[in-house]
Amino acid sequence: MKVECYDREGAEAYELVVRQVLQDLQLGRAIDDLRIFADPREPIFIIVVKFARAASPIYLEDMAIQEYDKEENKLHLRITDETYLPELLEKLWRLEGREKIQQPTRFEIIIENPTRKIEGLIVHDPQETLKKKIYDAIFRIIPEGFRVIRDISQDNIIAMVCTDELLPEEWIKKAYKIVEEIRS
């Protein structure tokens, strides 16, 4: 972690804030590198976070066996791993509508008159979950009042340029420079 600020005490205070937020959200191991450039005189705040790749997504086929009944026009899902069952139900409700989804037992879901193919459906994506937690952390770290934000994230790097005024191009260029440094 590197905090760049003209005020040494301010930089140390931000380091403490960052460490506390990362600890609160249990992100310590997921963050490979974190850089902050802050200058309250301008006012500018740039934060760049490089994070580790998370585990592979969990697909429907990883947790259920599908059987389609043509006569009844129903798709039966036999649950083999109920770890992500709440997420599966939520996705099915969004795709097909809650009224068409029945769950007679813990290990069975029935979709009446299915309208969409669900083969290959991503039930749980650890990478997206990690990104959401990192964005949560960033919004806790950004100075209050800095509501003009440009997100220049790429791949496994989340980068934001923040201010309470207009964003000059020079700050955006500085943020891209930090992204390139952290990528190397």
Image (cartoon, helix red, strand yellow):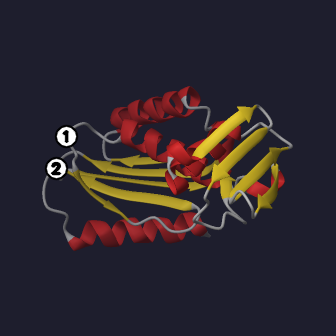
**Labels 2 and 1: the sequence-earlier one:** 1
Q: Is residue 74 left or right of residue 64?
A: left
Which quarter of the rendering shows the C terminus?
A: bottom right
Pointer 2 local density, CA inside 10 Å: few below 14, some 14–19, many at least 20: some
Q: Nearer the viewer, residue 175 or 153?
A: 153
What residue is pinned by disc 1? 145
What residue is pinned by disc 2? 164
Give the image location of residue 48, x and y in percent.
Answer: 46, 56
Considering every residue shown, the one lying at the far left of the view is 165
Tag 1: residue type? Gly
Tell me, yes or no, if residue 125 can be seen here: no
Occupied quadrant, residue 114: bottom right
Q: Nearer the viewer, residue 49 or 94?
A: 94
Q: Residue at x 16, y 49 (%)?
A: 164
In the rendered view, tell whether residue 170 sits above or below residue 56: below
Q: Residue at x 82, y 58 (%)?
A: 67
Q: Residue at x 81, y 50 (%)?
A: 64
Q: Residue at x 69, y 41 (%)?
A: 29
Q: Nearer the viewer, residue 174 or 56?
A: 56
Give the image location of residue 54, x and y in percent.
Answer: 70, 53
Considering every residue shown, the one lying at the far front of the view is 71
Tag 2: residue type? Asp
